[in-house]
Image (cartoon, helix red, strand yellow):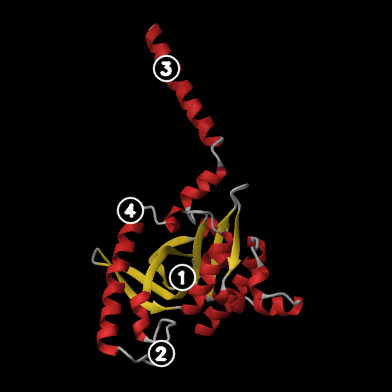
């Protein structure tokens, strides 16, 4: 082997070694931030979905004010006192919905963070005077994003409070996880210190996993349950998934 070939080999080997070491020493908090960046709304997809949410909500507002002004239909999906309130409502921040397959919950393969997969669904908080009044759900159909439903006023308020409590300035340390078969929602919160994921149980999870009853027995507020470790919720999730699957049969 020629000297210059040996030199190039040593340089390339050294470069690869430096790269591998730098990856190993990279900030775990930074890697966690990259994994959850979609809630911050900075990705290309997030911008596309945001634009679709703004467009469709404007049409929703215009339709309801023109057709239903001065009234409030029963079962209206947003928490307003009058349809005209919609003139002052706005699409706020959005987040992707992740879920965990029931078989993974039952088998306990890996941790919840690695088991969670994007569902292709986004949700945007709708606010009125800086207060959440509901959620807009968006999906992609034939390459076009659009709102498919409105509702979830209780969940919107719960999510907003949890995000305000646990999110960083860009909300990049958070993911929304829904375990459909357990009827449970969580906010995954990644620590900036150790990059560990912990979970804030939201309204449905507090009820379906009996966390509500647990808080009542201890005399604490359900909202003060705080962040839970995976070990705190995995067994209740398994029980709930198994029960609901058996009931469905």
Where does residue 241 sit, x and y in percent of width and height? Answer: 56, 74
Closer mark to the observer between disc 2 and disc 1: 1
Q: Earlier in the sequence, mark 3 or mark 1?
A: 3
Disc 3 packing (10 Å; few <14; some 14–19; many ≥20) = few
Q: Earlier in the sequence, mark 4 or mark 3?
A: 3
Q: Is residue 214 toward the left or the right of residue 237 in the image?
A: right
Q: Earlier in the sequence, mark 2 or mark 3?
A: 3
Numbered disc 3: secondary structure: helix
Distance from label 2 to label 4 (Cα)? 35 Å
The residue identified by callout 4 is 44
The residue identified by callout 2 is 75
Residue at (69, 80) in percent of width and height: 213
Nearer to me, 177 or 100: 177
Numbered disc 2: secondary structure: loop
Distance from label 2 to label 3 (Cα)? 71 Å
- The answer to whether mark 3 and mark 1 are in CB contact below 8 A is no
- The image's mark for residue 130 is 1
- The answer to whether mark 2 and mark 4 are in CB contact below 8 A is no
Numbered disc 4: secondary structure: helix
Eyeballing the image, is 9 above or below 28?
above
Q: Earlier in the sequence, mark 2 or mark 4?
A: 4
């Amino acid at each position: 082997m020629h000297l210059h070939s040996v030199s190039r080999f040593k340089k390339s080997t050294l470069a690869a070694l430096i790269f591998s070491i730098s990856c190993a020493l990279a900030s775990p908090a930074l890697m966690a931030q990259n994994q959850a960046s979609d809630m911050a709304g900075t990705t290309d997809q997030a911008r596309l979905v945001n634009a679709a949410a703004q467009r469709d909500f404007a049409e929703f507002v215009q339709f309801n004010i023109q057709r239903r002004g001065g009234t409030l239909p029963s079962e209206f999906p947003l928490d307003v006192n009058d349809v005209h309130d919609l003139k002052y409502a706005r699409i706020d921040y959005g987040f992707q919905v992740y879920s965990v397959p029931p078989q993974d919950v039952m088998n306990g393969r890996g941790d919840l963070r690695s088991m969670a997969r994007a569902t292709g669904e986004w949700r945007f908080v709708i606010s009125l005077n800086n207060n959440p009044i509901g959620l807009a759900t968006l999906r992609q159909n034939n390459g076009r994003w659009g709102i498919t439903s409105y509702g979830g006023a209780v969940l919107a308020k719960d999510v907003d409070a949890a995000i305000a409590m646990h999110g960083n300035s860009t909300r990049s340390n958070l993911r929304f996880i829904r375990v459909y078969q357990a009827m449970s929602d969580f906010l995954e919160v990644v620590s900036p210190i150790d990059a560990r994921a912990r979970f804030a149980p939201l309204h449905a999870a507090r009820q379906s996993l009996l966390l509500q009853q647990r808080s009542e027995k201890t005399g604490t507020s359900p909202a003060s349950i705080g962040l839970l470790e995976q070990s705190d919720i995995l067994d209740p999730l398994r029980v709930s998934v198994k029960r609901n699957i058996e009931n469905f049969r």
